[in-house]
Amino acid sequence: MLTIGCHLSIAKGFAAAARDAASIGANTFQFFTRNPRGGKAKPLDAADLETFAQVCAEEHIESILAHAPYTLNPSSDKAQTREFALMTLADDLERMEHIWPGQLYNMHPGSHVGQGAEAAIQMIADALNSVLKPEQTTTLLLETMAGKGSEVGRTFEEIRAIIDCVELSDHVGVCLDTCHVWDGGYDIVTNLDGVLQQFDEIIGIDRLRAVHLNDSKNPLSAHKDRHEKIGQGHIGFEALASVVNHLTLRDLPFYLETPHDELSGYADEIRRLRMT
Ligand code: FE
Ligand code: FE
Ligand code: ZN
């Protein structure tokens, strides 16, 4: 059975988010650990987490993926921004051990803001080397990026270069975002096998732990990062159905980050993808 869900709010707690997931036919979900623009995380509520574990067991929610704030930039040229990234990563990873051990935590690698990709790659790896702990059970994922602005992680080579500099790289994996790789220049519409082969040769397919399933408002290599509803963009339903059914990918968890105002929009996408 396909493991699929979408991005959900945890504003009403984890148990409520798990019920939302179940209500739309999801068996996993993604959430922001805190305000996506940064700031302090809400303290964890032990009673909510206990109910959350029960709801997940009852509703067959198999896994969760946390997402770091997208303003996080461990390769900033400002010491204060780098410091915030370190504090947030360390705090989030610690919280994950309480929320649900053994799950996934995704981050955008960073932006080099004019310092060059090479310097940024080292700064991102340095940050990971300072926050990853041998005893942690959470796997940290680096997300493949569209290459907007000075984003690092558009190419598989850049992701590989970061991982190569991480000491505890057993705790590091990759989250492939279909909109981002498409915008970044990887043609998953006409050459999915070829793209996955490149991923395997450069990063190693066993590093791939999750997929963000999004259509794109823009054509191949646009470097824009504008998500579209499944089947309404330049990637298209057929290509995204091939992604979830691909032998190499189909056992991974898939997360919709498509633009919907109502949960019913996600329910519909999940239902259609499960039918393929
Ligand atoms: Fe993301
Ligand atoms: Fe994404
Ligand atoms: Zn995106």
Image (tube, rainbow, N blue to C red):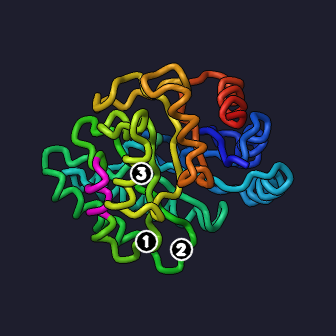
Q: Amino acid at mark 2?
A: Gln
Q: Amino acid at mark 1?
A: Leu
Q: Residue visible at 38% across and 54% down? A: 197
- First in sequence, mark 2 or 3: give its number: 2
- First in sequence, mark 3 or 1: give its number: 1
Image position, residue 260 (x, y; %):
59, 23
Q: Main secondary structure of the magenta part?
A: helix
* Disc 2 from disc 3: Cα separation: 29 Å
Q: Quadrant of residue 146?
A: top left
Q: Quadrant of the C terminus?
A: top right
Label number found at residue 136 = 2
From the image, state whether disc 3 or disc 1 is nearer to you. Answer: 3
Q: Badge 1: how crowded within 10 Å, few (<14), some, or many (20+)? A: many
Q: Quadrant of residue 120?
A: bottom left
Which residue is labeled 3 in the image? 196
Residue found farthest to the bottom: 134
Q: Amino acid at mark 3?
A: Leu
143 versus 102 height, above or below: above
